[in-house]
Image: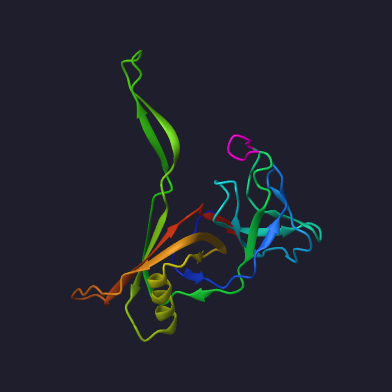
Amino acid sequence: MPYAFPEGSSFYFSEDFAAPKTITVMTNASPTVATSVAHGFVDGDELVLASGWEDASDSVFKADALTADTFSLLDLDTTSTQFYTPGGGANSTVRKILSWTEIPQVLTTSTSGGDPKYTTISPLARRNAINVPTGFNATSVTLTLGHDPSLANYKTLVGISRRLAPVAFKMRLSGGYVSYGYGYVGVSEQPSLNVGQANQVTATFTLLGRSMSYAS
């Protein structure tokens, strides 16, 4: 299907992780191949990676089990040795996400960040300044929720927000697509009230790493 639409989408969070497994080797490849003795993962497992490679760390990837001791992290291209220093992925860890909790009564979503950031340089030898890319702006996803403090899942999300605990985040989109992130969530506990609208609060997920999307 060439297009996807928001109707039918659902949203989830998780702080339910298995014990971390150590990765001894990560190859410079597309996708990277990780070595972790007796990892126990199967195809499609959702994994949070913590790595010395900044551009791969604190993100959620799907696993492709290769052997009893190796697996790939799908769509993680580490062929650029400028950003993925050979050997820099050693002593990484992965944690399998064990379960997801649905976020209730999502009304709207919005995103910000994730775009390249630039530093403006004005060399003396040039009349015109230039913008040099220096990384990426932080990504945030804000959900507007219908306020209902009696809902158990909402109470759990508020508790995580108040503890400043990192969580995994998943959007399951119509058409079978999924998008992941990992970071912190902040919930506005005071509802906003507007005539003709449901009472609303916001939950904002600020990602520590990349947002990854897959066709499930």
Position of the C terminus by quadrant: bottom right
Q: Residue at x 49, y 71 (%)?
A: 12
**Please, which residue is most extreme toward the front here?**
91
Question: Which residue, as the protein is rendered here, is positioned at the far bottom?
Answer: 150
Residue 119 percent location from the top left of the image: 37, 33
Q: Is residue 24 visible?
A: yes
Q: Which residues are magenta?
A: 80-85
Q: Which of these two is toward me, 182 or 192?
A: 182
- Magenta span includes 113: no
- Looking at the image, which residue is at 74% across and 57% down? 36
In the image, 155 versus 1, the foreground residue is 155
Q: Is residue 79 left or right of residue 111?
A: right
Compared with 1, 164 (above or below) is below
- Residue 157 horizontal/vertical position (percent): 42, 75
Quarter placement of the N terminus = bottom right
Residue at 59% x, 70% y: name it.
17
Q: Is residue 172 above or below residue 53?
A: below
State the image coordinates of residue 27 (x, y, percent, origin top left): 71, 45
Point 47% across, 60% down: residue: 183
**Residue 187: x and y, percent?**
35, 70
Q: How is the image coloured?
A: rainbow
Secondary structure mostly seen in the magenta stretch: loop
